[in-house]
Image: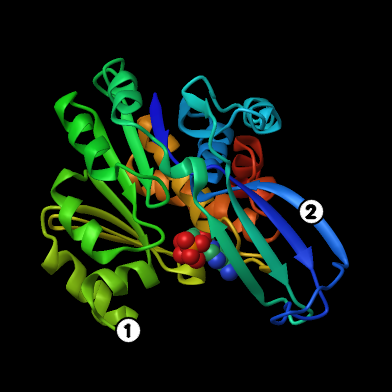
Amino acid sequence: TIYNFGSINLDHLYQLDHFVRPGETMASNSYQCLLGGKGANQSVALAKAGANVKHVGAIHHSDQAIIKQLESLGVDTGLIAQIDVPTGHAIIQLNQEAENSIILYQGANHALTEEQIDNVLSNASEGDWVLLQNETNLIEYTMRKAQEYGVKVAFNPAPMDAELTKNVLDLVDLLIVNEVEAMDLIGTSDIDSTIEAFPKAYPELAVLMTLGKAGVCYFNGNEKLSVKAFSVKAVDTTAAGDTFIGFCLASLMNGDDITRSITRACAASAICVTRLGAASSIPTQDEVTAFLAK
Ligand code: ADP
C-alpha cells in the first residue's frame, strides 16, 4: 500500500479576454471546475498504474463529488477527513495568450492533524510507502512517524521550499524533483551543473530528477542512470510530473527494477503531455503497455 498524504483542490478555470484589473468586474467566456492538486493527481496516477493507493488528506464535508470521482478512478478515499473547513481551491484566470494568473487557497489541505497522521501510520505495515508533496501541513511530523513505523518515504517537494526540504532530507528514502526544484535546492542556475552537483551534495540520497522533454536522471550512491524522454508532440504538460511519479512508484512497488520503472513512467508522462488537462490526461496501464510495444 502507498499512503499519499496529499493536497486535493478544486480548480476553478475562467477563460477571459484579459486578466481582471483593479476595480473591474468582468464576465467570463467559459467556466470549468476540475479536480486538481498535486496530491490528488499523483493518487490518480498511482491508481491508474495499478498501485494500491490510500489518499490521506482533508476536504469540506459538502464536497462529496470529489470522493465519488477519486473512488471511480480507483483511489481509496477512506482516509480523507471530511471537515468543516473549505476544500483547497484555485481560482485560475486564463487570458487569450494562454497565460494564467492563480489565487490559491490551501483550506482543508492544511488542516491535517497529528492524531489523523498517527491513526493512519499505526495501521501501516512494513513494505508500505508514504508519499508527500509540499501542499499539505505537518510534513516533517508525517515523515518522522513513517520512520518510527518502518515505512519508506518518497518526497516530491513541490512547490519547492528549500529550507523545509533541506531540513527533512535525512528522513527521505526517495526524492523526486523537476529541474527547477533541483536548481532551487542546490542553488545552481543551469541544469548541467545541477546534475553534476546533486549527487556530490547528497551522496546518501536516492534522487529522481525529471528534466521535461530531456528525460530523467537517477542517482543513488555511486549508481547514476539517465533515461531519454519519448519523442511526442506535446500540447499540454500539466500533470506530466504527477503522472511520472505515480507510474514510477507503482512500478517500483510492483518489484520492477529502476530502469524499467523509469521507462514505464516516461511512457506514461509522454502520453499525458499529448492530451489537454490534468487528472483526465493521465493514461491507464494498458495504454502505457501499448505505447511501449509500438
Ligand atoms: P514537471 O511537470 O513536474 O515540471 P517535467 O516537466 O520534468 O515535470 O516532466 C516529467 C516527465 O514527463 C519528464 O521526465 C518526461 O519523461 C515527461 N515529459 C515532460 N515533457 C515532455 C515532452 N515535451 N515530451 C515527452 N515527454 C515529456
Please give left or right for residue 70 compared with residue 146 in the image. Answer: right
User: Residue 237 location, x and y as percent?
Assistant: 60, 64
Which residue is identified by label 2? 32
Q: Which mark is residue 231?
A: none
User: Residue 261 location, x and y as percent?
Assistant: 41, 44
Q: Amino acid at mark 1?
A: Asp
User: Residue 209 location, x and y as percent?
Assistant: 34, 62
User: Residue 246 location, x and y as percent?
Assistant: 48, 42
Viewer-nearest of labels 1 and 2?
A: 2
- Residue found 62% across the figure and 31% down from its top: 70
Q: Are marks 1 and 2 in contact (CB under 8 Å)?
A: no
Asked if residue 51 is positioned above or below residue 202 in the image, the reply reads: above
Circle 2 SS class:
strand
Circle 1 SS class:
loop
Q: Is residue 247 visible to us here? A: no
Question: How many numbered badges does the structure rendering display?
Answer: 2
Q: Residues within 10 Å of mark 2 (few under 14, many from 20)?
A: few
- Give the Cα separation between the discs numbered 1 and 2: 37 Å
- In the foreground, 219 or 148: 148
- Residue found 83% across the figure and 79% down from its top: 17
Residue that extends furthest to the top in the rendered view of this protein: 123
Q: Quadrant of residue 200?
A: bottom left
Q: Residues within 10 Å of mark 1 (few under 14, many from 20)?
A: few
Q: Amino acid at mark 2?
A: Gln
Which residue is identified by label 1? 190
